[in-house]
Amino acid sequence: MLYADFMSTALPPLPPHDERAPGLDLLQLGASGDESCLRADAARNRAKLLDAAARLIAEHGADGVTMEAVAAAAQVGKGTVFRRFGDRTGLLTALLDHSERKFQAAFLSGPPPLGPGAPPAERLRAFGHALLRRTVDELDLQLAAEAAPDRRFTVPARRVLHGHVALLLRQAVPHADSELLAHTLMAQLSPALVHHLVRQCRMPVERLEAHWSDLVARVTSCQGHHTPAPHPGSAAT
Amino acid sequence: MLYADFMSTALPPLPPHDERAPGLDLLQLGASGDESCLRADAARNRAKLLDAAARLIAEHGADGVTMEAVAAAAQVGKGTVFRRFGDRTGLLTALLDHSERKFQAAFLSGPPPLGPGAPPAERLRAFGHALLRRTVDELDLQLAAEAAPDRRFTVPARRVLHGHVALLLRQAVPHADSELLAHTLMAQLSPALVHHLVRQCRMPVERLEAHWSDLVARVTSCQGHHTPAPHPGSAAT
DNA sequence: TAACGATCCGGACCGAGGTCCGTTTAATTT
DNA sequence: AAATTAAACGGACCTCGGTCCGGATCGTTA
């Protein structure tokens, strides 16, 4: 499995079942923190909570999603929410999980140009456009679900996306520092930036797409100016 | 003045004197929220607060800086802290203000290659390296001072940096979308990313520097693949 | 110097995130 | 079916960021 190297990083596990537990299922396929392996009541409550949260978000927007409100709406104790999702970020992230999986499936095993089959550069372009659209669609939730600065880049979902981009880059431009280049590209799609450009600066999404394409072109063509020997074995992501 | 266009954006002003008040002094030179124009007692308390905050940060790290703790250490009421700095982010930002100004002075009017006199591409490279170093030096504080997602790109300091990069890019590669390209470059220097790479992944700073140089080279040389007509008059940052 | 108005001060107060621990309940074993 | 145990539950409790407003202070004007 190409993404096996993700497995290597093992952080000290948190006490109980926790949605944001890292390490094990970084490649999330296969019901990561899902209802499986959960006691019956726990699974039921989890569903009730997610349902309640979704309802709240629909009614009062993202910041109407108070942990207490969710607990109340799901007729469940506050402690249960935290036990299940760890913290607010965990809950919001869980809300995004479905679309996340769909997206992963699309670029991991879907049809080209997003999925395998197309040349790497073209897959990259498709990837950016697709993720951009998705980010715009779920902007409010994405913003609310942003992790603290020191977690932001270790969140499983993020690592999968980054790893994928890095992989494509390695194929498209082998002599470059794909790890860092992947971060450069990914930054273009961060919810905060997209929010700023689209919502606050009123930029049309097409311009962001064009910029992404341009960036991919710049990076993949004229290959390696200094090409700073990417220390292959050393510090990875 | 080249940075005059920053002035155009005027947001509704906050009630009292507030450090994070935008619009007026985006080009911060000239004692932005400083002791001037403050009532004597206010100025005195401001100094006491900053002093106390710095002391707390030295002793207990960034998250020892509780608004209440700062107030107590400065022998001042809690309300005073908020009146002066708006919120926690404002206080932390004020703590960074000194180094911020120094840095601005360096690239605005200092000696080349950082200041004017060198060719744009080289200034860009110097800029990245310098900011990278500074970010690493103040990492803890920078992380703690990170603004909420919807403010992150409208913070005055950030706009100055972004504007400068955009300006250099316009000179170096006129046909590209400098606004967006500036965001791309700036993202490379964000505290969160630097923290992830340097602290969590143990990457040597030299590798980040090399990547920055490579990026600048890629962007400034092989100019414009699609060069997506940057809509000059339209939505600016 | 006395009076006045704008600004500032202080700390009680509130809401929300997060923790803790005694109690309850689901799965398993005998 | 009863006993056992690991897991889940619930809500009181704590902390901290942020707000509010009556009262004190400063700078100014007469």
Image: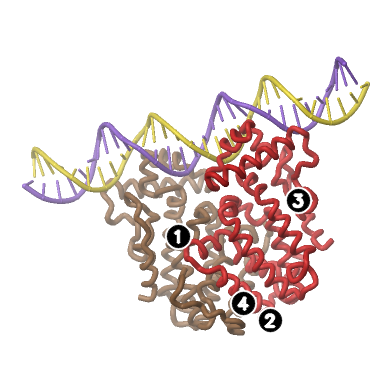
Chain colours: A red, B brown, C yellow, D purple
Could you confirm whether marks 1 and 2 are on the same chain? no
Q: Quadrant of residue A127?
A: bottom right
Cα–Cα gap, marks 1 and 2 = 35 Å
In this rendering, is residue A182 above or below B38? below
Q: Gap between marks 4 and 1, in whole Å?
A: 27 Å
What subunit carries mark 3? A
Camera sees residue A213: yes
**Which residue is denoted by mark 3 in the rendering?**
A23
Q: Amino acid at mark 1?
A: Val
Q: Find disc 2 in the rendering and name its residue.
A: A221
**Which image quadrant is residue D22 in?**
top left
For badge 2, the amino acid type reads: Ser
Q: Which residue is mark 1?
A: B155
User: Is the residue under label 1 in contact with that under label 4 (CB below 8 Å)?
Assistant: no
Q: CA distance from mark 1 to mark 3?
A: 35 Å
Foreground disc of the pair 3, 4: 4
Q: Pointer 1: residues within 10 angstroms few (<14), some, or many (20+)?
A: some
For marks 2 and 4, the one nearer the N-term is: 4
Check if mark 2 and mark 3 are on a common chain. yes
Front residue (pair B120, A70): A70
Which dot, 2 or 4, sits closer to the camera? 4
Q: Residue at point 57% right, 46% down?
A: A58
For disc 4, the marked residue is A214
Label 1: element kind: loop
Pointer 1 chain: B
Residue B222 vs B166, above or below: the answer is below
Residue at coordinates 38% horizontally, 76% vertically from top-left?
A: B2
Which corner quadrant of the image does residue B156 belong to?
A: bottom left
Q: Position of residue A207 (x, y in %)?
A: 55, 72
